[in-house]
Image (tube, rainbow, N blue to C red):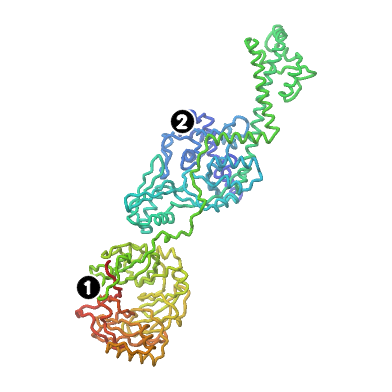
Amino acid sequence: MRKSYLDYAMSVIVARSVPDIRDGLKPVHRRILYSMNESNYVFNKPYRKSARIVGDVMGKYHPHGDAAIYDAMVRMAQDFSMRLELIDGQGNFGSMDGDPPAAMRYTEARLAKIANYLVDDLDKETVDFNANYDETAFEPVVLPAKYPNILINGAVGIAVGMATSIPPHNLREVIDATIALIENNNLSVSDLNKIIKGPDFPTGGIILNKEGIKSTYETGRGSCTIRSKTSFEDINKDKKAIIIHEIPFQVNKSRLLEKIAETVNNKIIEGVSDIRDESDRKGVRIVIELKRDVEHEIILNKLFKFTPLQSTFSSNILALNDGKPEQLNLKQILNAFIVFRKKIITKRTIFNLNQSRKKAHVLIGFVISNLNLDKILNLIRKSKNTSEAKKALMNEKWRLGEDIIELVKLIENNEENLVSSKYSLSEEQSKAILELRLHRLTSLEREEIKTDLNKVIKEINNYLEILNSDEILFKKMKEEMNIIKEEFSTERKSIILENQPDENYDEIKYIQKEDIVITLSHRGYIKRVPLKNYKSQKRGGKGRTGMATRDNDFVSQIFVVSTHTKLLIFSSFGKVYSLNSYDIPEGSLQSRGKPIINILPIKNDEIVSAVVPLPINEEEWNKLYIMFATSFGMIRKNKLIDVAKSGQQSLRESGKTAIKLNKDDKLIGVNLCRDVEDTFLSTTDGKCLRFPIAKIRLHQGLMSKGVKGIKLKDKNKVISMCTLIHSKIDISIRKEFLKYSSGMRKDNKTNGENSDFIELRKQEEFIFSITSKGIGKRSSAYEYRIANRGGYGITGIIKTNKSGDVINSFPVENDDEIILVTNGGKIIRIPVKDVRIAGRSTKGVSIFKIPDTEEIVSVTKVKLLDYE
């Protein structure tokens, strides 16, 4: 079994999948080219049916399926597969869209002109021949290629236990590098890389990653990134289109379009309004129309990132060298070709030398016959027949002059016919003399014979010079390659970028930095509006929330950030999503926005619990913590960077678990915080607990449930979490200040405060609390003493049967507004300054009168923003 498997593996490697380093061909391609040349289906002859070509190859040399032979033949005729097509096809030979070629009975083909330089000199004993599979014909082991086809057209193949992937190159560069190496074999791979800049793909494109090219040429392994060649066109005043002119090598154009459409439909790329394929025989032209006012550079770079518009070509230069698979660097490939060409030229020269000597040998006989014409005619007349005449000529010794003797020594392989300046005619010479027509005996014809002889002598001297001098041989080699270069070289199709683009592409560089207002509605509609569209709130002005309310919808969150701000979106299921603020659709002041489920992969039953804007300067992330709170009273403290930097791609594409929740538990709040602040938790029964963030244990992972923040009685739940300034004031001073400030508010006086109270008043925060029946108040944050986590808390507002459950508590400022919404669809907006300030352990007052059958279900704090 082991031996059989090894035999099979070597058969696949040598006879099927790996190209020969000398001609760059696999056996099937070599057999196709040889068969077409043998049948004279060459470039200057009429096209022949592909079915006939395939039949010849299969019947004589390649005993495999006709489909495989036709596929191999088709590839050699495709200008998007081959840098220089070896077959000139007529008919449908497939397309970049992956369309199959027409059946072989319809298409026609012949050898391309460049292929002539692969099969040329086959008839001059330059390569070895083996018997075909049934020993009825012979086929060449290798073609006597005159140029390094293995580099120019490349090769791809999968064998057993190994694979090859050789990129195509520019003919001019390859020949120039080969000639340079002939002239100086001490050139390094780096020196050759200066001549061969890199691969040159038939489909063009832009090549990135020069280090990958360098690795490929030095080790035989490496990769390069191919980017489509694109441009921008203006469709109208504020709309652009991305035009794709060239696509990466081996990328199926039809599938590329499908992938682009898929990324657009799946909201991975937004801002595309239409995709059209306008490609024709002149080349590729894909038009991607963009929506109004989108950043075209961002869309293009997302296309490079998420579609095959940018792809990687991995190189593995594996080829058969002396019949063995070897991984080779650039210099080894070129050296192997130079050695091969030297052998071919040597064999061809020997063949030509022998042919010239044979011709000169006969011409020497003619010269001797002219010098001894009467004697020869006399011998012929005396002979009874041709055979006797031939023997008479051969037996005669012919005296030669010194000039003829020197020619004989040059021409003859041995000097047996020349003894003591006398020459014996050979059988070939005697036969040629007897077959000589009488008109060749005229004086003009005798001169022509001498001219022919001198010409042949010159050829012989030329061949001997080549064989005796490597310098002349290499000169001949360079001349032949230069002829090919002059006739077939073209400009590079693939551009190699000297200045590599930043691989860590940051699309934010293309976003104009400006302040924006982001609003999120209760029903999950989100939008952004430039802050410049608002004006500062005038004292006593009515103000606006920045979104029109409709269908019982209202603004649930509103905040001002920059277009460079990154947002973390947390859902009630404990998941976190990442969103760039500039990816939020821009809207007008009165527009509703776009459903957030169309921007992020949020489920229909998921509710956005918190939107956390992150500092633009990512260095600040290391200094911040993030606090989670759940409805069951669990809290958890993490470093912000552990959440914001955790699997950034999955944060954007599918979200990630931020906190593990118990059954029926929900995430109700997420805050950025520092150790110098306090966390404030509130519950449905009016309890609240304030404790220092510095005393909370720091968690490392995101899959834990955290620790108990506040104990709950019965079926109570935590309804809010907020962050307060940490207070270090003495209890007695705090009590005195609260008593004093309460009295001052009643009398509406601020004069006469001592310096300590003035400072406390500047730092004073107020907690707004509201119940489901519209009972609410403001209380000084100083009234909520600092305790340890895990307790039951203290009363924040007295709950009664009439007041209903507490639904929210959070810090407010005097210029804020509160929006209250009932389950019956009623909405009211109340300025915070109109809400009464009362003590912590009080019931509060009626803020919103609602029917007995309704309850408040949502409370939102907004800033006062007005129209420009």
Asked if residue 825 lies left or right of residue 289, the reply is left
Q: Is residue 379 above or below residue 866?
A: above
Q: Spot the residue most to the front.
A: 751
Q: Residues within 10 Å of mark 2 (few under 14, many from 20)?
A: some
Is 49 in front, or is 544? 544
Q: Which residue: 43% across, 36% down?
A: 104
Q: Which residue is mark 1?
A: 825
Query: Which is nearer the N-term, disc 2 or disc 1?
Result: 2
Q: Is residue 666 left or right of residue 59?
A: left
Q: Which residue is under mark 2? A: 48
Q: Quadrant of the C terminus?
A: bottom left
Q: Residue at x 75, y 16 (%)?
A: 400
Any part of residue 66 in sight: no
SS of the residue at dot 1? Answer: loop
Q: Is residue 46 above or below residue 490?
A: above
**How far separated are the C-alphas under marks 2 and 1?**
81 Å
Q: Amino acid at mark 2?
A: Arg
Q: Is residue 724 visible?
A: yes
Question: For this rendering, which residue is in front, 772 or 671?
Answer: 671
Position of residue 746 relative to residue 410, above or below, is: below
> Residue 647 appears at what percent x and percent y?
45, 66
Residue 589 position, x and y percent, is 27, 65
- When the figure is inspected, residue 232 is found, relative to residue 128, above or below; the finding is below
